[in-house]
């Protein structure tokens, strides 16, 4: 079915076209600025390294905490990525241009979710290598690890886009965003940690229910963002 067959289909295709435009714009901006490469990735890796030295690997504490430390590092890096994505647009007036551009708000939201997710997945690949190197983790249950990382990242990106838009227009956005986002994504941190622990312990069957819950969380925030991003942009 072509995009012009019905008004409903045409509108849906317009959303995806707008999402692709915003997705490409955000990724090009990130590639030019290299903030993620020069700041976010080193920060997240440093978190892993500090915990590797702070916790005694011989006591087994480091091994038991591997999954949680991985997702704490991802979450802290996600905060930086979301702040960067919206602060640049606010300071440069791009947010106003987006509101006046005629782009579908749902498309803007999906584009931002996609760009944030790609950045976080790239970060997780680096952190995964760091976990194997510094923590001696044995990546068994690879299927569960990959699925958990994908759905958890999608949930983080969707929630980050929603709360990033809420905080974007405020002068205290840098301090308000963590206060809004961290409680909202606590289920992601808990669920992803539990699923990763099951995979690393060699009992992936115990982790799939957690991965399913992460998928539900991601779908809820995606649906909320698609429906409400327009009013959020107007208030930003």
Image: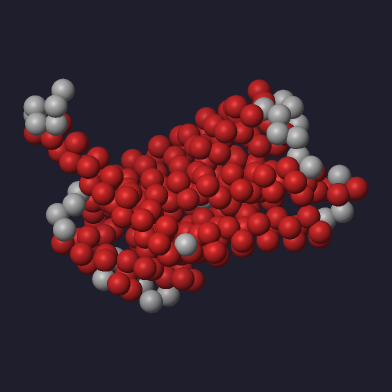
Q: Position of residue 80 (x, y in %)?
A: 51, 62
Most distant residue in the bottom direction: 171
In the image shown, does 188 or 129 lie closer to the viewer?
129
* Whether residue 137 is situated above or below residue 47 in the rendered picture: above
Residue sitting at x 87%, y 53%: 56
Residue sitting at x 39%, y 49%: 115
The quarter of the image holding the C terminus is bottom left
Residue sitting at x 67%, y 44%: 129
Taking the image as drawn, is residue 228 in sight? no
Most distant residue in the front direction: 32
Based on the displayed image, in which of its 4 quarters is residue 209 positioned?
Answer: top right
For this view, does 185 lie left or right of residue 46? left
* Whether residue 39 is situated above or below residue 172 in the rendered picture: above
Residue sitting at x 40%, y 37%: 219
Scheme by which the image is coloured: secondary structure
Q: Position of residue 186 (x, y in %)?
A: 56, 50
Taking the image as drawn, is residue 123 in sight? yes
Most distant residue in the right direction: 58
For this view, does 231 lie left or right of residue 167? left
In the image shown, does 89 or 229 lie closer to the viewer?
89
Count how many numbered circles sit on residues in the image. Answer: 0
Based on the displayed image, in which of its 4 quarters is residue 50 positioned?
Answer: bottom right
Q: Position of residue 188 (x, y in %)?
A: 55, 44
The quarter of the image holding the N terminus is top left
């Amino acid at each position: 079915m072509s995009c012009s067959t019905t008004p409903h289909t045409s509108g849906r295709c317009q959303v995806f076209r707008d999402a692709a435009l915003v997705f490409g714009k955000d990724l090009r901006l990130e590639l030019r600025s290299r903030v993620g490469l020069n700041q976010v990735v080193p920060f997240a890796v440093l978190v892993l390294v500090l915990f590797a030295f702070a916790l005694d690997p011989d006591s087994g504490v480091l091994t038991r905490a591997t999954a949680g430390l991985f997702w704490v590092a991802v979450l802290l890096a996600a905060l930086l990525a979301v702040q960067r994505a919206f602060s640049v647009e606010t300071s440069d007036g791009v947010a106003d241009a987006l509101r006046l551009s005629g782009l579908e708000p749902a498309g803007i939201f999906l584009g931002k979710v996609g760009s944030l997710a790609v950045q976080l997945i790239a970060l997780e690949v680096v952190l995964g290598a760091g976990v194997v190197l510094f923590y001696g983790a044995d990546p068994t249950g690879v299927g569960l690890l990959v699925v958990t990382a994908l759905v958890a990242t999608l949930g983080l990106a969707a929630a980050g886009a929603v709360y990033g838009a809420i905080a974007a227009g405020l002068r205290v956005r840098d301090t308000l965003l963590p206060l809004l986002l961290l409680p909202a994504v606590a289920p992601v941190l808990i669920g992803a940690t539990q699923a990763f622990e099951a995979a690393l312990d060699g009992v992936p069957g115990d982790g799939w229910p957690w991965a399913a819950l992460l998928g539900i969380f991601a779908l809820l925030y995606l649906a909320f963002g698609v429906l409400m991003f327009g009013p959020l942009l107007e208030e930003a």
